Image (cartoon, coloured by chain):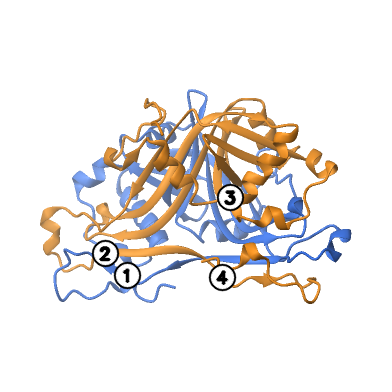
Chain colours: A orange, B blue
Amino acid sequence: MSEYPIDQRNKVKRVPKRGHYDQETVYAVLDASFLCHVGFVADDQPFVIPTAFGRKDNKIYLHGAATSRMMVHGGAGFPICVTVTMVDGIVLARSAFHHSMNYRSAVVFGKASVVSGEEKEAALKIISDQILPGRWEESRLPNAKELKATTVLEMTIEQGSAKIRTGPPKDDAADYQLPIWAGVIPMETKYMAPVPDPELTEGIKLAASAKDLS
Amino acid sequence: MSEYPIDQRNKVKRVPKRGHYDQETVYAVLDASFLCHVGFVADDQPFVIPTAFGRKDNKIYLHGAATSRMMVHGGAGFPICVTVTMVDGIVLARSAFHHSMNYRSAVVFGKASVVSGEEKEAALKIISDQILPGRWEESRLPNAKELKATTVLEMTIEQGSAKIRTGPPKDDAADYQLPIWAGVIPMETKYMAPVPDPELTEGIKLAASAKDLS
């Protein structure tokens, strides 16, 4: 896989060694979540909206109500930004200044277009697979009315970068002698025990897709 | 506390009953995290950057390297958007169409300005307190050089909204008879056991701020 071209738009300026431009690293960060934050502009006002997404190859898929502003603006081909972030821990340094987080983030740029025809259902499956692999096949699939009510956008990633911090704090040399605890408080997002729908018909076993999540 | 004025910018259009405009609810969502995604525009390109933040009263505080684009654009008074999202679970409906997430999100709008003088250190404490209460008092506080290298922005929230989904899936009436498991897979972000810095001086006990995190 190749690297995204680097310019002012995607260059990691602050702590450059944390920046990554190869598709393999950017994809790994994107694929670690199903939640992204989409940025778009309407009347000079930036909007940042959380939403589910899917990635396949060098494309990001988004879906929403056909009437949603994000779908309308995105589908009109204006530039958008899609960001995915995982916080892996709080980094406690001795100095307030060197406090940090361990994190993985990916910021990708492109222009979206509306997906139609047979590709639309395939794109919805990509989003579903990103959330919970195998669930699409278990579900009652969308009918014509539902497909019509949903807009699906496809964005080819023109450019992107990942930024990753790991490891212990870094303090100024003189501060290591201070009697202050320093280290990392790791954070993890976990799946808890599935809660059946109170309306669930008796005797239906837990979905295979929801087993063994950790 | 009062409600934010509602117009096209902050109105929750999709599933309006999930929208909240009272400051109490918006603040509660903001205060549930220390990570936000900041949206700003440069040369018609939207950017969405993850960063730590703090809230006090009706203000959001952000900090960063004085050279960072987000700090420079934000500090110039252009409109920005600050979004905080917690995913609380994956909602598995019988139909693919009604799959959803349980979540809490807050989207707030305003224009930022640069904080200087004595207020700058107070603002940095607000951000630190949002990440880990009590840590500021334990740390070696910023010196003049560190304060100079850091830009702090303050944004009064002009307008905002929260959007919250809780509870089980909602399916179309006809779908409840399908032999498909439905329910919620809750998700929680947890703090794990603190990892001391390998360079930690022997005999220094775990910071009080890092005890009893759950």
Q: Position of residue B35 (x, y in %)?
A: 45, 53
Mark 4 vs mark 3: give the one in front: 3
Mark 3 vs mark 1: give the one in front: 3
Q: Determine if marks 2 and 4 fall on one subunit.
A: yes
| Mark 2 / mark 3, whichever is N-terminal | 3
Q: Determine if marks 4 and 3 fall on one subunit.
A: yes
According to the image, label 2 marks what residue? A183
Bin the neighbour count of mark 1 within 10 Å (Cα to Cα): few under 14, some 14-19, many 20 and up: many
What's the residue at 66%, 72% (across, down)?
A195
- Disc 3: host chain: A
According to the image, label 1 marks what residue? B194
Q: Which mark is residue B151?
A: none
CA–CA distance between discs 2 and 3? 33 Å
The amino acid sitting under disc 3 is Gln
| Mark 2 / mark 4, whichever is N-terminal | 2
Q: Left or right: where does residue B44 sit relative to residue B146?
A: right
**Answer yes or no: do the residues labelled 1 and 2 have beta carbons within 8 Å?**
yes
The amino acid sitting under disc 2 is Gly
Bin the neighbour count of mark 3 within 10 Å (Cα to Cα): few under 14, some 14-19, many 20 and up: many
**Answer yes or no: do the residues labelled 2 and 4 have beta carbons within 8 Å?**
no
Q: Which mark is residue A192?
A: 4
What's the residue at 35%, 47% (across, down)?
A164
According to the image, label 3 marks what residue? A130
Secondary structure beneath disc 3? Answer: helix
Secondary structure beneath disc 4? Answer: loop
Bin the neighbour count of mark 2 within 10 Å (Cα to Cα): few under 14, some 14-19, many 20 and up: many
Q: Position of residue A37 (x, y in %)?
A: 54, 44
Q: Quadrant of the C terminus of chain B?
A: bottom left
Q: Left or right: where does residue A82 sit relative to residue B100?
A: left
Q: Position of residue A157 (x, y in %)?
A: 51, 31
